[in-house]
């Protein structure tokens, strides 16, 4: 023990044994909702998840996965992977990026920090560029924060501002891009009336332009770089409103996948390429889909694509996106300090850990799980395996994704006897749910259920324990509803497809032959959330959780 009294050593659990292999399975986007035809989990054949729910009521329960339970500003905020996995891994509720940015804007502290002072040096003679997701989804960014930042920066001397928008359609309804662009155009024209040269300069759909993650497809980031930095894109328009309206009129257009475009002046020149001396802010608070662009903007040595021209800029992130890489080095708001995560504790207490998912979710069970920290805590005790995701497709065309491969890797890791914890994320419900394709999402849910079976069978063989949960809802509700839960129809009488996450709770199920027979869920914790899972996991490894962790979900009945 150090002089502060802090110790990494976890006390032994008074009743639960050590040495039982534990499988931790996170079903991405798998919430609990009323059974109807838009609940793809209900519609799909999911015998394994059904049996966990119906077979052992004392070992299955729901926990909150959205809003304040995971550190978001309000209970109107849907859950998401970053906050969900942060809570699962860290065992405590941290005020998350969305909330920290709200607070910094409200108090004005955002304008007093090193990050803002740094970019401000460009205000007098150069341009301020703001790049990010344009919606009020609240998962990666929020329109009202962009509006406040535009106002705050212009009041503090920014004379020329260029906004590079990424249309959403994933955290908000498809087609809503037009309204968001209208709102932003209106704000920018008000700034122009005050003598500030403020315009939208480029754009594109988030899944096709810029917002790739975990290095799945650098072409996505390159398309953004070409439009935002170089001012080059296959589509050129006089205004962003014309751009989104025209591109949306194409067959099968989708906000998530709009092609890149630049706004040009009367002589056909891009109105806002990034030039030497300019300042750039990436306005998303969430990390995963900004890290790749942050590398392209910040790294001198960079070989992921040909940047062609690398302007000397002052760059700041809304937050620092990667605490280990210290990326970006400048930022407007300090990220939550998520330290002493369960992963770090357990590794330091000898728990040999295996984590696996496919590329699009790989960082969820590693980076997010470990508090937005990349890399291993201890290479000798950990192995993280990434299965390459399909790239360049929307996942409704291959809804089984790599669920089988992930499950097989987990199975092999469990059977190898080399690991105490085997942790996976099964992406299907979420990634296919985001496409809005109901039929494909049903196939996706079935595939995830089959993957769970493979893992639970392996647990059975080695006499281990499992804990199956989810990070937030998605596939359990695919339609936008009115307050009383009735599906909302669009103008042509079709249902309004919900591509986003939900506010629904998620299941936690425990079991397996290695589970002490007296273990059951406590009934004295009324509204637990995902943050209660970490202490539970520590208990299942035979340890007590640190005192400041959210309480465990389980108790051990006296025999
Ligand atoms: O795809 C994403 O970036 C988000 C939705 O915006 O989903 P998740 O939180 O499940 O990663
Ligand atoms: Mn998720
Ligand atoms: Mn998602």
Image: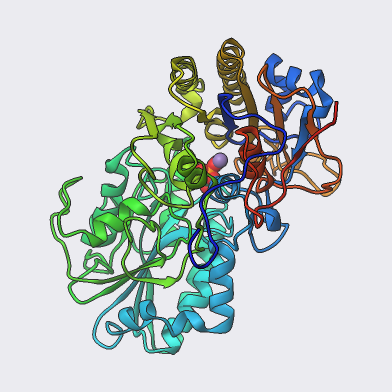
Question: From the viewer's perspective, is residue 288 above or below residue 432?
Answer: below
Above or below for 453 versus 324? above
Closer-to-camera residue (475/465): 465
List x then y, in percent, for residue 421.
Answer: 52, 30
Q: How is the image coloured?
A: rainbow
Residue 249 visible in the displayed image: no
Total marks in image: 0
Whether residue 427 is visible to the viewer of this picture, yes or no, is: yes
Look at 63% across and 25% down and name the residue there.
466
Q: Position of residue 124 (x, y in %)?
A: 28, 88
> Residue drawn at (52%, 55%), measured in percent from left and top?
7
**Residue 47 on image: x %, y %:** 70, 14
Q: Seen in the image, is 122 located left or right of residue 22?
A: left
Nearer-the-camera pick, 129 or 301: 301
> In the picture provided, is 162 more to the left or to the right than 83?
left
On-image quarter of the C terminus? top right
- How far from the left and from the top, in percent, is residue 221? 30, 48
Residue at coordinates 77% horizontally, 22% vertically from top-left? 517
Q: Residue at x 65, y 48 (%)?
A: 531
Image vertical order of residue 23 relative to residue 247, above or below: above
460 or 46, which lies in front?
460
């Amino acid at each position: 023990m150090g002089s502060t009294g802090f110790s990494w050593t976890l006390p032994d659990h008074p009743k639960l044994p050590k040495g039982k292999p534990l499988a931790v399975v996170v079903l991405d986007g798998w919430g609990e909702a009323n059974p109807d035809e838009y609940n793809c989990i209900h519609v799909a054949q999911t015998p394994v998840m059904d049996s966990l729910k119906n077979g052992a009521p004392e070992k299955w329960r729901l926990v909150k996965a959205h809003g304040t339970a995971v550190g978001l500003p309000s209970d109107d905020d849907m859950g998401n992977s970053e906050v969900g996995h942060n809570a699962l891994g860290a065992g405590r509720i941290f005020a998350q990026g969305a909330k920290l940015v709200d607070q910094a804007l409200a108090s004005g502290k955002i304008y007093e920090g090193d990050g803002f002072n740094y970019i401000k040096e460009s205000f007098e003679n150069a341009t301020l560029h703001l790049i990010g997701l344009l919606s009020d989804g609240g998962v990666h960014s929020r329109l009202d924060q962009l509006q406040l930042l535009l106002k705050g920066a212009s009041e503090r001397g920014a004379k020329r501002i260029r906004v590079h928008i990424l249309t959403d359609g994933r955290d908000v309804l498809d087609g809503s891009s037009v309204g968001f662009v209208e709102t932003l155009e209106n704000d920018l024209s008000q700034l122009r009336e005050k003598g500030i040269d403020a315009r939208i300069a480029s754009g594109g759909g988030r899944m096709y332009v810029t917002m790739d993650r975990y290095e799945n497809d650098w072409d996505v980031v390159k398309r953004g770089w070409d439009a935002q930095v170089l001012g080059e894109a296959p589509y050129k328009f006089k205004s962003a409103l014309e751009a989104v309206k025209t591109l949306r009129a194409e067959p099968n257009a989708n906000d998530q996948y709009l092609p890149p475009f630049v706004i040009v002046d009367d002589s056909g020149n891009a109105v806002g390429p990034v030039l030497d001396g300019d300042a750039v802010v990436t306005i998303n608070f969430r990390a995963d889909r900004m890290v790749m662009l942050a590398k392209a903007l910040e790294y001198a040595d960079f070989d992921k694509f040909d940047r062609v021209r690398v302007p000397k800029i002052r760059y700041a992130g809304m937050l620092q996106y990667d605490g280990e890489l210290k990326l970006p080095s400048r930022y407007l708001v300090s990220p939550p300090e998520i330290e002493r995560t369960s992963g770090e504790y357990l590794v330091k207490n000898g728990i040999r850990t295996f984590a696996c998912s496919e590329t699009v979710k790989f960082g969820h069970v590693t980076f997010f799980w470990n508090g937005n920290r990349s890399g291993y805590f201890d290479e000798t005790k950990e192995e993280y395996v990434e299965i390459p995701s399909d790239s360049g497709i929307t996942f409704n065309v291959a809804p089984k994704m790599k669920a089988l491969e992930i499950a097989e890797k987990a199975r092999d890791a469990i059977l190898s006897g080399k690991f105490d914890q085997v942790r996976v994320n099964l992406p299907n419900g979420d990634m296919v749910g985001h496409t809005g394709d109901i039929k494909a999402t049903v196939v996706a849910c079935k595939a995830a259920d089959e993957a769970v079976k493979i893992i639970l069978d392996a647990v059975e063989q080695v006499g281990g324990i499992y804990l199956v949960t989810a990070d937030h809802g998605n596939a359990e509700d695919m339609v936008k509803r009115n307050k009383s839960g009735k599906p909302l129809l669009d103008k042509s009488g079709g249902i309004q497809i919900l591509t986003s996450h939900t506010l629904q709770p998620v299941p936690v199920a425990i079991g397996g032959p290695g589970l002490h027979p007296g273990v059951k869920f406590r009934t004295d914790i009324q509204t637990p959330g995902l943050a209660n899972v970490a202490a539970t996991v520590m208990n299942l490894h035979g340890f007590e959780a640190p005192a400041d962790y959210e309480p465990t979900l389980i108790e051990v009945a006296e025999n």
